[in-house]
Image (cartoon, coloured by chain):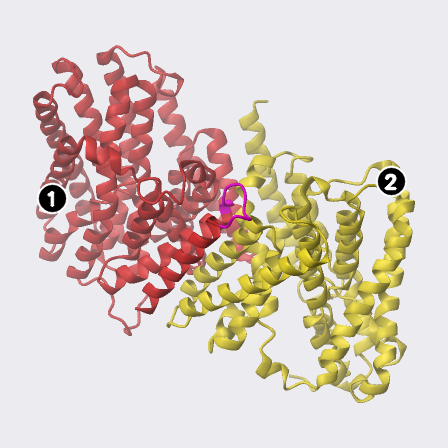
Chain colours: A red, B yellow
Amino acid sequence: MSRLFGLLALALLMFLLVSLPAATGGAPLSMLLGFLMLAAFACGKLGNRIGLPGITGYLLAGLALGPSCFGVLKQEAIADLTLINSFALTLIALTAGGEVNLGRIRKRLVSFLLITSTQVVLTFSGVLLLMLAALHFFHEVFSLGFKGLLAVSALFAVTAISTSPSATIAVIVETRAKGPLSELVLGITIVKDILVIVAFALTLGAAGQILGQNLTDTAQPDLLARLSWEIGGSILFGLALGMGIIAYMRYVSAEMTLFIIGLSFCSSTASQALHFNALLVCMVAGLVVNNLSRRGEDFIRAIEKGSLPLYVIFFAIAGASINLEILSSGWKLVAILVASRIFFFWLGTSAGAALAREELKIRQNLWLGFITQAGITLGIAVVVAENFGALGVVFKNLVIGAVAIFELVGPVAFKFALGRAGEIPHKGRPVAR
Amino acid sequence: MSESTRTVLLVLLVGLFALVGGRFIFGRRGRSTLFRVTSLAYLALGFILGERGWGLLSRGMLGNLEPVVGLALGWTGLLFGLQFELRRLRRYRGRFAWLTLSQSLWTILLLGAAVLLAWDHTGTAGGSRWPAILLLALAGAAGSPVETALAVSASLSVRRKFARLAHYVNSLDSLPPLILFGLTIGYFHSRAGSGMTAALEWLAAALMLGIVLGLLFNSYARHRHSENELTMMIIAFTVFSAGIAAYLSLSSLLIGTVTGVVLANLLPSSERIFRVLAARERPVLIVLLVLVGANWAPIPAGRLAPAAGLLLLILAVQPLAKLSALAFWRRWLGNELEGAGWSAGLALLGQGGMSVALVASYQIHFGAAAEPLAISLALALVVVAEALGAYAARLAVTGGEREEAE
């Protein structure tokens, strides 16, 4: 109750401040960010009270304060927060990579491969077919021939494969979950991240030819070279970054907070300049640090120890970016996309887990861990919009609508799955991390 | 070489510097730590990264990093304010507080007078002289307990009572500079008619806001929280209060301090908040130094000689003020001084986070009207104090009883 009171008092203070006659000009970025963080944190705590993961609260707070609802956070402010957001993302990705233990994954390699492949193949083909049928039925949305609809459906299917590593790691860190389910979800999510980039580049090239679009430079012919550069370069840079961190841990091992801040700045700036995928770079770096260094775990724990503000900022901004208007306009297609993705994730993951003869609790709950979606899917949507004109914009809006739902539902489902699989330690019980 | 390749090379170079520099700086533990140049190193790093250097921290990027500067200022203010827990302060003699206030005001007065007399000879003219003069006086008077602590830890025989007194004074003597800086900002406030009445009104507004935020923080923090959650709340509140301060053109340092005072006296677990703040104070200060360095505009070559003269004058007046203040108080604090002679005032020459924070606030509030000379000199004072302050403090605090080996 007192948390609610605190939240209301905070909102009242903010309201009074922005309506002060003495104040001219827009609210500074720091005021908006501070308010967003406090409101999101309080919402996260209130959400915890009813069993929801904190990030759902952060997302909801962001959504409420964003342009879609109260508009405290305008679109320009969200754009200005990109820099801070990208810092947060690099650190979240480092933690995600650092949580993957290759030794333990090697022991479950068969499961890992079977589940990944069945999930990817079934989800891609299933969503493609269902979306093809749906687009054919709602033909006025895209007004294309069969081949054109097939190309658009394939792009939808690619977006359906991906899962958000940041939301996944956020739930794992918050719940302090430990066990096969969390390891499988995180490991497969990271691998799928690479698969999605490859699949998207190939699909985009094919779709461009079918739809007769002159793709912009970012999506142009020497696709293979660009793809190799982005993925290969990201992995190599991530390896180098990881080795650099290990060297620092070994030879300096001081001022960790400062080092982490500098590292975040360097990796995001360098990735941006070299057109690498910052998420992939940092995940690989985290993976290298945790698996090749005995002190790696200390480093990852050092980030985790101060990670809450990162999650709050990242997900509150993600919530503020959710556009509800899009949901209301194309809700039928969004609903089909959402339902088909969930259904085929369930089918593919359960089939893979059954083939791998996983325990019942894994077979029943694993699929729930893959529902989250965020950054990379939105990135795909933006690239499609940039390359396919009006058609691309409709595509982007539909994908954003679906991501909005998955962003909100995914963490809840994952936390529920972790609870059912018995991987969330009870309060008061020591956690062996 | 393309822009992106250049950026990457620069970033990698910075990384290499960090690694080698880290090995050099941190590998020296165990040797004498009295001589330190970390402020200079990080200011230089900021300058190199800034727009006048390699341009990695461009103006646009610095604008987007405004919440980080706000965080650092709020952090410094909050940490300072949390020291004013009345229950704890009552354990010390009342004369300590009077010494703290009077020596700080005396230093401000002497420094202000000296800088005022010399300012016109530096070739700087225009309406921005008063805030610049005040900045130098206030930043020069704001102390830091680090130097005394270093001197004590590096000495075998220490005047323990005097070291305790010096620590007390150095920890709290930034209060008058903070309030006067808040008043200065109010006086030069852009939204209301200037003058002392307006200045006092804005000062009162800052104090009220600090109290409201303190009460709000108290309502958030009184539940049981993990350290991670406390860190999150501290970051959010400091960024929020700094944002409000920027919105209303008030001093974020002062608001943060008042918030800290409210918390220290209302929140039973304020000690935990203090620990979290203190544990991360160094990285926050370093980030602030880097950002201040990135914004720093060097003094033109033609004005270097008068600037050096003014710096020497300040460096002469500052110890004079501290020495004379302690000499005046000798009559009432003879017992605490434990035989420390004329050099007692040397223990109060430390400068650090608060001075840098005042410079950063000055850069924010006065923007284009900020006088580069004042900023350069205020930063030079911090660098000199860091390099020599601990040696000076050692002269004052040693010579007492031999400390028992721990």
Percent x, y for residue B62? 58, 41
The residue that appears at 48% across and 58% down in the rendered structure is B235
Residues B117 and A261: in front is B117
The residue that appears at 47% across and 68% down in the rendered structure is B215
Give left or right: position of A107 versus A16.
left
From the image, tell me which residue sits under label 2: B303
A136 up-or-down from A380: above or below: above
Q: Is residue A132 visible?
A: yes
The residue that appears at 68% across and 71% down in the rendered structure is B171
Circle 2: element type: helix
From the image, tell me which residue sits under label 1: A346
B270 up-or-down from A207: above or below: below
The N terminus of chain B: image quadrant: top right
Decide: few, some or many residues near mark 1? Use Cα within 10 Å; few <14, some 14-19, many ≥20.
many
Residue range in magenta is: A20-29
Residues A133 and A13: in front is A13
